[in-house]
Amino acid sequence: MGVVYKAVDLTLERTVALKFLPHEVAVSPADKENMVREARAASALDHPNIGVIHGLEETEDHQLFIVMGYYEGETLTQKINRGVVSVRESLNYAIQIAKGLSAAHSRNIVHRDIKPSNIIITTDNTAKIVDFGLARAVTSASATQSVSNTGTLPYMAPEQILGEAIDQRVDVWALGVIIVQMLTGSHPFLRPNAPAMTFAILNQPPTAVDAVPAPIQPIVYRALSKQASHRYANTEDMVKDLEAARAEITSTPSPLEDPTVTRAVSARELRSYVENASTPRWGASPRKFRRIALAAAAVLLIAAGIPFTPAVREHMAGLAYAYTGGEKHIAVLPFASPEGDPDFAAVSQGLSDSVTGDLSNLEAAQQSLWVLPASLVHRDQVTDPTAAFHKLGATIAIEGRLERRGSGVFLTLNLIDAKHLRQIGSARLSERSGDLSALESQAVQFVAQSMRVKVSPDALRATANVPPSSYESYLKALDYLKRFDKPGNVDLAISSVLSAVQTDPGFAIGYATLGDAYRLKYQTDRDPHWLDQADASCRKALQIAPQLASARVTLARLEVIAGKNDLALEEFRKALQVNPRNADALYGMGEIYESLGRAADAEATYQRAIALRPDYWGGYNYLAAFYDTQHRPQEAIATFRRVTQMTPDNPIAYSNLGAAYMVLEDPASQAEAQAAFEKSLQLAPTYQAYSNLGYLYLITGRYAAAAENLRKAVELNDQDWRVLANLMEAYRWLQQTDKIRSVRDKYVRLLEQSAAAAPGDANAQASLGIVYSESGQRQKALVCVKSALSSGPKDSFVLAGVAQVYENLGDRKRAVQFALDSLANGASLQELQHRLGLQGVLSDPGFRSSSTDRSNGK
């Protein structure tokens, strides 16, 4: 940061500190401006816990320096290095630091580099925050902070590491880290190296918090929430909570005050993270895998299996497919094939979709070319140029007919001016060897030549030299995955593409498609085994073709499921380098924005994705799920209804609609929910719909019907721990202990597997905590509680689960508090009443009086 000298002000006869830039650093106008800005910002602060700035001066050789107060004492780093700081002393320092920050934040000044070495403990035990060298003044309440991620790694908040816009909550995070260090002597995210520490800050819960005194733990958890929106919005509230905790702490010395308990993390250790590794930069914040359940562990909002795309901030108004100037809007119509051969019909349909994908790759480099997604053509059942123009705004339609004669394959292509119904060109393409990939390459080259678009040598390389039988199986898989929501289609796709890669082990796109099919299989039955298969398939694809975007996208989605959002973003970025206009990825980025609390950005991104693919049901499914998580049930219901209108044969759509109705909890809405679930089951007996209907019966007290439907769900899929959890809850209410024992072992095994596969799944962690607490495994239960609260500190279902853990552990006071927090964060009393393990909590006078006060608005 610079060089600081101890000096004497001869005029006022006082000792001061003078801060210069290092002599070897050339002082540019920008450097000087930064120092002026620092001095102006910090000199406006007048508070006993902030180091004073006396002025800004310049030497004869034009070196700027800041005149600061000089304080006798030591840094907080030096104090921590001597051993654990006593509880009372730690709280006193924390309160002073928080008060100083509150004063700075009230002037819209953020320190950005709070750490023990920037805290001076004076000889009279006053904490002074010094070096506002990284502070920035916000010019107005609505201004957005700089996205610079300057700071010191061990104390940087997730959004600061990732280069996101920051505010005063980065200082709250840093203070949370310091509190843990003072009380335990351990850094909550200490790891062997900078990359590991970065990963821990972004993805893992803080360690050592369970060694912090109980009244202080909730403060630390809130301060160290991964999502800034879950932290203290202002440090004044943090001061109040710290003062309340100090009042609650007795005068009895804590075991933590014994400096031999743990070893403090030295300043040298923490400094090495900064000196030995550069700080990584990412374009978005981490996020945990978005919970797809609308109600505790059972309501399964199955999101569409769609790739991700880059963040988009442009205004969406006026975006449409109508013809504009010279822009070419191309629709590839479903290719026809001879009747009587359903397998070859699937190949023909897959070929038209694959040609669409190839043309979309060309689109990325051609501003005048716009390829309409195949899903639009299928959704509106567009089969002729006139419909393509009127329904989709296509200016050019591509018709095709695929035939097989002997060992050869033949494709007739016609390019039609869809507006004027004039033929632009036609071609008769053939491959006597039956090589469909070569035939596809000919088709794309013909269309590109007709459109005057260049085809680079790499454009079609991924499918070159693929054996005809492999490619035919691959095309069948594409046709099956087009409607992955239909029961059995994902299994058929896996079987087809497995056949393709077994015939040709070098078939990169085949492995990428197999990886995505396995991911969709996991989405269907929640068996973690499929995640491993998906990951291995994608990595195999990238070994063969490192630039294969589809494999990168699927890998990114797997990283999101595992809660590794930083890695997911890197994969997305690599995929987007290949095709920066991949509209499908918008859905995933919308989910990331949603997890960051940037609801407006999330909604705009979902809406833009829908504008790009207005007739694809999956986009509306994502948007409806977003409305649900934002507590906008009427909009969620209306949007899910639109999905059912678009795909009236889609059982998932009706199951999701029922789940949205169930949130309202009034009798009329519950009747609508039941009707939607029953409609879903009429279309297809899926385990999701049986599970949702069973949960509806569970929360309305119809336990026998709940058990019957949940049992049917398990018969269809016994690999989802959430369904087993609710089945056991129904058995508990029916007092059928033998049946509980019959499923408990499997439930625990699946739950442990799921929690290990997706450590960011707060619901799984809370549920596992309940299991451990029921069997008396206190330490394991508390570790799960810590992980759950780290990932989902405001999730009502998670908070209810944590309440149940503490009730099982005999801590009624905490159980009551977390049950009340669950209510405050959106849970209904009805939901809590149907948790058998919370009956004692709900009847507790403390809960009853507090919940009554809340319902009366007190």
Image: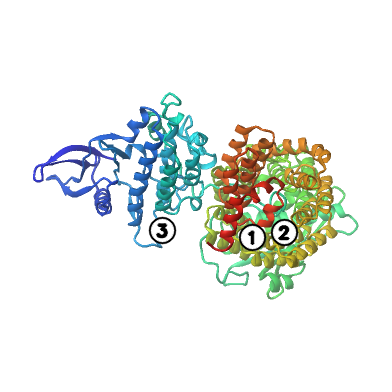
Instruction: Give the structural element (helix, strand or loop) at label 1.
Output: helix
With 248 as the anchor, is 488 left or right in this view?
A: right
Residue furthest toward the right? 340
Q: What residue lies at 39% left-to-right and 62% top-to-bottom?
A: 141
Q: What residue lies at 22% left-to-right and 42% top-to-bottom?
A: 19
Asked if residue 627 can be seen in this view, the reply is yes
Three-letter amino acid code at the position of disc 1: Asp
Mark earlier in primary sequence (1, 3): 3
Spot occupied by residue 816 in the image (x, y as percentages of width and height): 59, 48
Q: For this rendering, which residue is in front, 285 or 49?
A: 49
Q: CA distance from mark 2 to mark 1?
A: 10 Å
Q: For this rendering, which residue is in front, 252 or 741?
A: 252
Spot occupied by residue 173 in the image (x, y as percentages of width and height): 44, 45
Three-letter amino acid code at the position of disc 2: Ala
With 66 as the anchor, is 599 left or right in this view?
A: right
Q: Is residue 27 above or below residue 306?
A: above
Q: Are marks 2 and 1 in contact (CB under 8 Å)?
A: yes
Instruction: Give the structural element (helix, strand or loop) at label 2.
Output: helix
Which residue bears the numbered disc 2? 659
Which label is found at residue 628?
Answer: 1
Tell me the quarter of the picture where residue 370 sits.
Answer: bottom right
Q: What residue lies at 72% left-to-right and 60% top-to-bottom?
A: 662
Q: Quadrant of the N terminus?
A: top left
Tell me the quarter of the picture where residue 782 sits.
Answer: top right
Which residue bears the numbered disc 3? 144
Residue furthest toward the top? 260
Residue furthest toward the front? 845
